[in-house]
Image: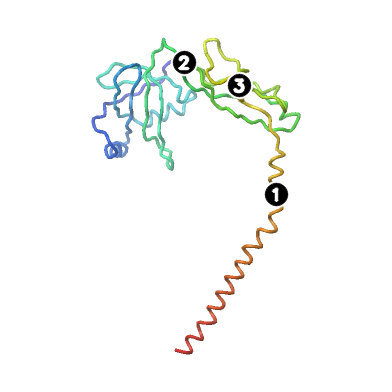
Amino acid sequence: MTASFNVKAQIRSQRGTRAARRLRREGLIPAVLYGASKETLSLVVNPKEITTILNSPTGYNSIFTLEVEGHPKQNVLIKDWTFEPVRSTLLHADFFRIAMDKPIDVKVPVRTVGEAKGVKLEGGILEIVLREIEISCLPSDIPDHIPVDVSELTFGKNIRVGDLQVDSRVKIISDPGLTVAHITTVKEEKVAEVVVEGAVPEAPAEPEVIKKGKTVEEGEEAEAAPEKAEKK
């Protein structure tokens, strides 16, 4: 994997919540650069460029070139980021310096290959238990994903981390005993449906009683009102 993106950044002189809000109103966001035993820099970047990287095929494992005003170009990864929950707009990003000749630890998503026999022949459901695998390798060797062949997967069998096949240049760090995928049944869901169906006749009874009670009370109040009016 080589650097395919280039991001320009400026040094951020002002810090704090007010300064960050002001930046966002201007269409920019605060960011931080650290790692490689060098000084930490507070930066200002364009969120659109970072969002483009996060939405690329390599996602947060994308290596890109960061140009900071007054500093030499450097290769970095997006180490962390924050989205606004309602609008899903990027609010902040952390960048991590990397050396292309030194291994780094990253998490890579898994991607299933083939159709499981447990689904095709036995009517089961394929469940992916572990969606990311932690690995260690050189930055240029980071894979886009780790393939998981589920073709022979049937009921009673599990695919574990130790069963995965990766390039010899990649070392898996995740516990080899962790389950990645297995076949599950729908019986539990059917049982849940029966319980719900059994409770259906009883459910309307309570609201109906309450409704009648409120109707009666309202009727009593309605009848009482004219009596008070006549007394007046």
> Of marks 2 and 3, which one's residue comes earlier in the chain?
2
Crowd class of label 3 (few under 14; some 14 to 19; many from 20; radius 10 Å): few
- Residue 195's label in the rendered image is 1
Inter-mark Cα distance, 2 to 3: 29 Å
Q: Position of residue 53 (x, y in %)?
A: 43, 26
In the rendered structure, are the residues bearing label 1 and label 3 in contact, judged by CB atoms less than 8 Å apart? Answer: no
Q: Quadrant of residue 65?
A: top left
Q: Position of residue 70 (x, y in %)?
A: 24, 19
Q: Is residue 133 left or right of residue 7?
A: right
> Of marks 1 and 3, which one's residue comes earlier in the chain?
3
Regarding mark 3 in the picture, which secondary structure is present there? loop
Q: Relative to 189, say whether 59 is above or below.
A: above
Looking at the image, is mark 2 or mark 3 nearer the viewer?
3
Q: Relative to 154, say whether 171 is above or below.
A: above
Amino acid type of disc 2?
A: Met
Amino acid type of disc 1?
A: Val
| Residue under pointer 2 | 1
Regarding mark 2 in the picture, which secondary structure is present there? loop
Q: Quadrant of residue 69?
A: top left
> Which residue is painted at 71% across and 53% down in the image?
198
Q: Is residue 203 left or right of residue 26?
A: right
> Which residue is painted at 71% across and 44% down in the image?
191
Looking at the image, is mark 1 or mark 3 nearer the viewer?
3
| Residue under pointer 3 | 177
Amino acid type of disc 3?
A: Gly
Inter-mark Cα distance, 1 to 2: 52 Å
Crowd class of label 2 (few under 14; some 14 to 19; many from 20; radius 10 Å): some
Q: Quadrant of residue 96?
A: top left
Crowd class of label 1 (few under 14; some 14 to 19; many from 20; radius 10 Å): few
> Of marks 1 and 2, which one's residue comes earlier in the chain?
2
